[in-house]
Image (cartoon, rainbow, N blue to C red):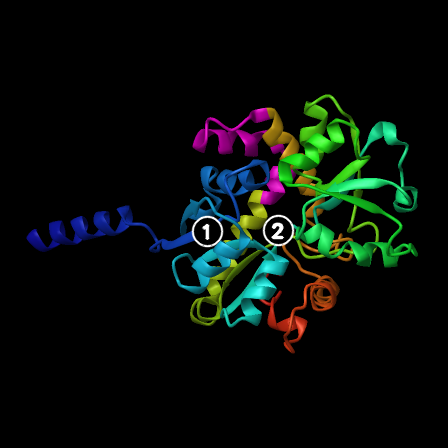
Amino acid sequence: MMKWMLAAMATLLLGAAPSAAQDRVSLRLNWLLYGFHTPFYLGVERGFYREAGIELTIGEGQGSARAVQLVAAGSDTFGLSDGSSIINGVARGAPLQAVMGIMNRSPFAIIVREDSGIRTMRDLAGRTIAATTGEAGLVIFPALLRANGMAPDSVRFLRVDGAGKLVATLENRTVGLLGGVENQALIMPQRGVPVRSILYADNGANTMGLAIHATRETLQRNPEMVRRFIRATQRAFDLAERDPDAAIAAGLRVKPDMERDLSLAQLRAGLPLVRSARGQDRPIGWMPPEDWAETLSLMREYQELRTELPAEAFYTNALLPQ
């Protein structure tokens, strides 16, 4: 009788226990939580990561380069950074690889006033736009001119600080500014000035936007966990594409002071950038080799990147679920 009772208790205890231990995983964002980040929180809220055997902690960031540093140092399992920061980090010895492209099309844009009459790159000839010295979009702007058959001096720049770009364009001292389609392009209409965005990605100068990266040690030691994390993230972004309001609601439950309408606009502006023009029929997260090669080429030419590493050293699609 006693043996039967002990066996029954053991069965109940085993049945109550989870089928598998959860992997404790952390994700470091590239910046403070904003609209485009909310699908990750949606994935946590809907249990996608938990169902994948992952207990996910998400931390706000202080820039893409900082996320690269934290992951390389082992402080976080995964990081979210722009392609240029990943390339710079790996070129300097960070043992990382990108495993999933979250924003495969660059958000860089020339944001022009709607009343300027500018509709194409060539319309910018002889006009003045605002930019900040050293910003990434300005550094590779010559590639944009070359791709569109324009002379290197065909566009003039008013060089001001970040806040000054908005002021100069709002005051109509410039026809537009360099910025992000999911950032400044949304702020200007809130200030009463409708705008039109001319995307770098649509005009011959695409660079990798945001990608999730991990250390090579993590990829080698626990590739199955990485696959499960990617799959859960795919589910989260797929749902966000279909129901962006749900993603924003999940983000607001974590950060109630987020401005709802702006956050929703940021998410709606970012989602069309998730898939590359070279991979529209591919699953979320797939990174076209040509996009990494183009980013690397532009960095070598315009940012004085010195590395002999091939593009394949910086990313891998091998862990994407098929």
Q: Image height check: is 103 above or below 35?
A: below
Identify which residue is drawn at 54% across, 53% down. 64
Residues at marks 2 and 1, CA–CA distance in whole angstroms:
13 Å
Look at label 2 and name its amino acid: Ile
What kind of element bears circle 1?
strand
Prevailing secondary structure class for the magenta stretch in the rendered image:
helix
> Magenta stretch?
237-260
* Numbered circles on residues, count: 2
What residue sits 71% from the left and 51% below the top? Answer: 137
Q: Residues within 10 Å of mark 1 (few under 14, many from 20)?
A: many
Comparing 239 with 105, the one in front is: 105
Q: Nearer the viewer, residue 245 or 321?
A: 245
The picture places residue 136, in percent across and down from the top left corner, at 67, 53
Q: Is residue 121 left or right of residue 289?
A: right
Say what amino acid the circle numbered 1 marks. Leu
Q: Residues within 10 Å of mark 2 (few under 14, many from 20)?
A: many
Question: Residue 162's image quarter?
Answer: top right
On screen, residue 231 versus residue 197, left or right, reads left
State the image quarter where residue 99 is shown. Answer: bottom right
**Can you give x and y, in whole percent of width and height, for residue 110 in the image?**
78, 42
Q: Residue furthest bottom?
A: 308
227 magenta-colored:
no
As rendered, which of 254 and 107 lies closer to the eye? 107
Badge 2 marks a residue whose secondary structure is loop
Q: Which mark is residue 203?
A: none
58 horizontally vs 276: left or right:
left
Q: Which residue is mark 2?
A: 102
| Residue receiving disc 1 | 27
On screen, residue 87 above or below 54: below
